[in-house]
Image (tube, rainbow, N blue to C red):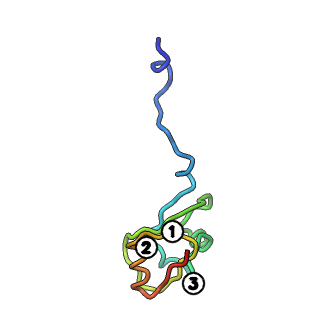
Amino acid sequence: MPIQRRLPKFGFTSMKSLGFQEVRLSELSKVDGEIVDILSLKSAGILKKDVKSTKIVLSGSISKAVTVKGIPVTKGARAAIEAAGGKVEE
C-alpha cells in the first residue's frame, strides 16, 4: 500500500498563529485606565496568558479616549480611536 494511504490525514498548524489573538475595538472599554498595552489587556482578561502578539481590529465602537502603546492597529480602528479622542503610539 502506498505511503500516502498509510499515513493519517491532518492539517498544518502554524506555530505563529498559536501565540496571536485579535482584539475587537469594543473590548477596549473593559480595560481600566487610559493606557492600553499587552499587559493591561491580559490583566483585564481580554487576552489569554500565553498570547505573545495581538492586533486591534475595527469591530464595534469605542466611547472613551484611550492611548494604545506597542500594539498594531488597523486603519479603521485607528480612525475610530482618534475620533473618540484617543491616540495610537507604536
Say which residue appears at 51% left-offset and 68% top-offset: 72
Mark 1 or mark 2: which comes first in sequence?
A: 2
Q: Nearer the viewer, mark 3 or mark 1?
A: 1
Residue at disc 1, secondary structure = loop
Residue linked to disc 3: 33
Q: Is residue 15 left or right of residue 60?
A: right
Whether residue 56 is situated above or below residue 63 in the rendered picture? above
**Which quadrant does the C terminus fall into?**
bottom right
Task: Name the amino acid type tagged 1.
Answer: Pro
Q: Position of residue 89 (x, y in %)?
A: 54, 78
Residue 79: which quarter of the image?
A: bottom left
Label 3, secondary structure: give it: loop
Q: Residue furthest bottom?
A: 85
Return the disc, 3 or 2, that comes first in the chain's sequence.
Answer: 2
Q: What is the CA distance from the residue labelled 3 to the residue labelled 1? A: 19 Å
Q: Is residue 30 above or below residue 9?
A: below
Residue at coordinates 60% horizontally, 60% vertically from top-left? 52
Question: Residue 55 appears at what percent x and percent y?
Answer: 49, 65
**What residue does disc 2 label?**
25
- Residue at x-position 62% and y-position 71%: 39
The location of residue 61, given as percent across then percent down, is: 38, 77
In this rendering, position of residue 60 left or right of residue 50:
left
Circle 2: residue type: Leu
